[in-house]
Amino acid sequence: MTVTGRVGGHSKTSSHTKQRTVLLAEVVGYCFGVRRAVEMTERAATERAGRVTSLGPLIHNAQVTDRLKASGIESAAHLDEIASGTVVLSAHGSAPIVLRQARDRGLEIVDGTCPFVTRVHRAAKSLVENGYRVLLVGDPGHTEVIGVVAAIEEMGGWVRRVSSPEQVAALHLGGKVGVLSQTTQRRETFAAIVAEVCKLVSDVRAVNTVCGATEELQAAAIRLARQVDLVIVIGGRQSANTRRLRELCEEQGVVARQVETADDIDQAWLERSDVVGITAGASTPDWLIEEVARAVNGGSLPEGWRINHPDEG
């Protein structure tokens, strides 16, 4: 089979060959917060004396973590494993107590927290100070959610994590309730939960803290899915925003496969697909996207190849 590709349109080929068209989503990959955290960490490794250690994964991408490790940047699961040098805090944010403990240990600190995650923390603080109970729309066990919940509880606030309207209905809410969102949630999920809260509580303050890059990636993935037979979604297995892109594509009625690298691609998927779409989560670097595109497109990048990141224009 002859494999050809053109981003953004169908190319012509001879009737004696079977064409595969490869389409790239309008925006893919690294968002501002992820790019910022990686660049801050790489800069710290060259400018600061002593060890540079990430507290937990800097971002949810194992391949990026491996590259950082190869350049001398380690990762530690717990703060007490870091005896000296510089600690880098995850792009997903940390509980306030982590910052205090790092300072108490005499560690240098590089705070890689995404500014949009910081906005969630500020909104949570304002709600608690104004007497609101807080519902946080988020994924269980996600680093960002853990940090926000810890910050609220440290202030003495009431907080519950929810991920569906059904969970709201099961809660005994009263008084004033504020609703926030993990930055990588879906706007529709947030809106549905807010609507459910409004049925139960008269004083509701909703702050939509889904970040713009998330919405850009999701909207572009939906548009892509409506044009193709198969979507390859590139991103870490622990990446919530990547998983959400796959789910959105599947909701459009198309087969979607999530992969971390080109090695995860099953050629049988491609044999059954004349038009293949590619999208990637916010923690996926350009080099991984290009690796997958070459694998799908017979070893070369599709014609007119150009990667556009979210929040770049």
Image (tube, rainbow, N blue to C red):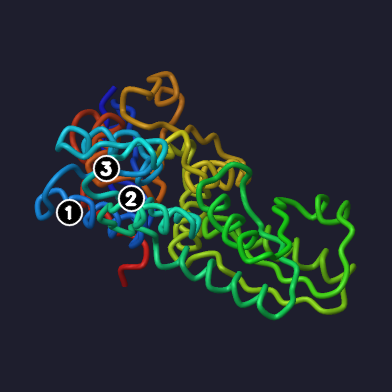
Query: Do tag 3 and tag 1 residues touch (Cβ < 8 Å)?
Result: no
Q: Is residue 312 above or below residue 182?
A: below
Coordinates of residue 278 in the picture (x, y in percent): 38, 43
Mark 1 residue crowding within 10 angstroms, few (<14) / some (14–19) / many (20+): many
Alpha carbons under labels 2 and 1: distance apart: 19 Å
Please state which amino acid type lies under the numbered disc 1. Ala
Task: Classify mark 3: helix, strand or loop.
Answer: strand
Coordinates of residue 311 in the picture (x, y in percent): 36, 67
Q: Is residue 110 above or below residue 262?
A: below
Task: Classify mark 1: helix, strand or loop.
Answer: helix
Residue shown at the point (32%, 22%) measured from the top left: 263
Q: Nearer the viewer, residue 189 or 17?
A: 189
Q: Nearer the viewer, residue 104 or 272?
A: 104
Is 307 left, or right, of 199 in this rendering? Answer: left
Please state which amino acid type lies under the numbered disc 3. Thr
Count numbered badges in the picture: 3
Residue carrying label 3: 53
Residue carrying label 1: 44
In this rendering, which labeled residue sits more in front, label 2 or label 3?
A: 2
Image quadrant assignment for residue 127? bottom right
Residue 275 visible in this rendered orientation of the protein: no
Q: Earlier in the sequence, mark 2 or mark 3?
A: 3
For residue 105, the mark is: 2
Task: Classify mark 2: helix, strand or loop.
Answer: loop
Image quarter where the C terminus lies is bottom left
Image quarter where the N terminus lies is top left
Residue shown at the point (26%, 32%) measured from the top left: 66
Alpha carbons under labels 2 and 3: distance apart: 14 Å
Is 89 left, or right, of 300 in this rendering? Answer: right
Is 63 left, or right, of 77 in this rendering? Answer: left
